[in-house]
Image (tube, helix red, strand yellow):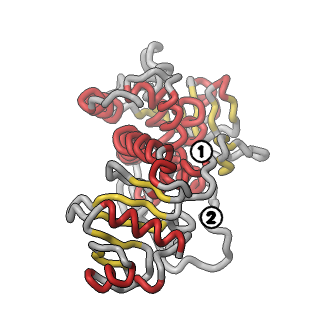
Amino acid sequence: MLRPFSRAVFGSRRALAASKQDCNGRFGISRSSMCSAAVKRVGTHSGSFHCDEALGCFMIRLTGKFSDARVVRTRDPKVLESVDAVLDVGGVYDHARDRYDHHQKGFEEVFGHGFNTKLSSAGLVYKHFGKEIIAKELQADEDHPDVHRLFLAVYKNFMEAIDAIDNGINQYDTKRPPRYVNNTDLSSRLGKLNLDWMDPDQSAEKEDEAFQRAMSLAGKEFLDSVWYHARSWLPARSVVKKCLEERLNIDPSGEIMVLDTFCPWKVLLFELEEEMKINPPIKYVIYQDERSKRWRVQAMTVAPDRFESRKALPARWRGLTDDELSKESAIPGGVFVHMSGFIGGNQTYKGTLAMAKAALKL
């Protein structure tokens, strides 16, 4: 696994990327074509902005090739032709020329690696530069296997939703309207940074300032996602993988896993079961509750977003506590079993393991 990361370096880089001013002193955003030839320029469209180009512009400026490049917001084809990279405008996707639009007819590019959502301009930038960006932020080798794991995890848990929302792809295959409105996602929050139609100042300068705030918001959340996955998700993945590999030492069925270090495990367990081709799948996970220090046995659900268990704890145990549970289960030290049978507890590890083993047979 990658070594622990120092956030001090990361923090200074984020501040630089978010606030670096261009030669006109306007936060790296300009509509002017006059600037030092040494400063590269990234073009995107003027007018109302969306999450994908704001994030794409932020990310591309973290690369070696376009480090702190000046963002030029325009729809003038001549200006766009003259800049070094173009995002979300121009009708061309050509990585060799650093053109990253996704609106043109026939565009069907996806991230790959099992993901089939059509990419936005941000997704295109991430597909081609994501590994480099992650490796630089973490000060790691781009070819390190953990960098590749993070590259995929950040796409799955952060980037793909931005691609889907920008391309108008529904999260669920249904014609029924949603049960509630959710305007709290990043794309929605960033969209609110556009100039209000009631604002008397609709100048290009005011619009560019709003776009800078959008870049900073999108960039902060992107880098937060990178660091969450590096500092929390990746170590947790190692813990769960090790515990899965040792499951046969716990019970010959291979259907009980003991989590020897408590960490976020549920989603990771589903992912690793598929990756490691675990069969039969895990039915129960045993762990020690960090607050009460008592042991728990939790039934695995059929899917990460479902409540139904693969094998709930026995019906005759459900709703019982303490002595009643110990008597009914014939296992000393019983604490409780939830009415739904998804979780139960015992005072000791030995008792909890006995509950899991008995539940498998009942």
Q: Residue at 36% across / 26% down in the picture?
A: 22
Q: Nearer the viewer, residue 208 or 199?
A: 208
Q: In this view, which residue lies farthest toward the left?
A: 292
Instruction: Specify the amino acid type for callout 2.
Output: Asn
Q: Which of 29 and 339 is in front in this view?
A: 339
Element at badge 1?
helix
Nearest to N terminus: mark 2 or mark 1 = 2
Q: Residue at 54% across / 36% down in the picture?
A: 126
Place residue 215 in its image quadrant: top left
107 left or right, relative to 264: right
Q: Name the residue under label 1.
A: 276
* Distance Cα–Cα, label 2 vs label 1: 30 Å
Disc number at residue 322?
none
Instruction: Specify the amino acid type for callout 1.
Output: Met
Q: In this view, which residue lies farthest toward the top?
A: 38
Element at badge 2?
loop
Q: Mark 2 points at which residue?
A: 170
* Image position of 244 with respect to 333: above or below: above
Q: In this view, which residue lies farthest toward the front?
A: 330
Quadrant in the picture for the N terminus: top left
Place residue 166 in its image quadrant: bottom right
Q: Where is residue 251 in the image (x, y as percent from the top left)?
A: 49, 55
Q: Residues within 10 Å of mark 1 (few under 14, many from 20)?
A: few
Q: Residue at 46% across / 66% down in the picture?
A: 357
Residue 83 visible (yes or no): yes
306 left or right, relative to 24: right
* Image position of 136 with respect to 190: above or below: above
Q: Where is residue 26 in the image (x, y as percent from the top left)?
A: 34, 33
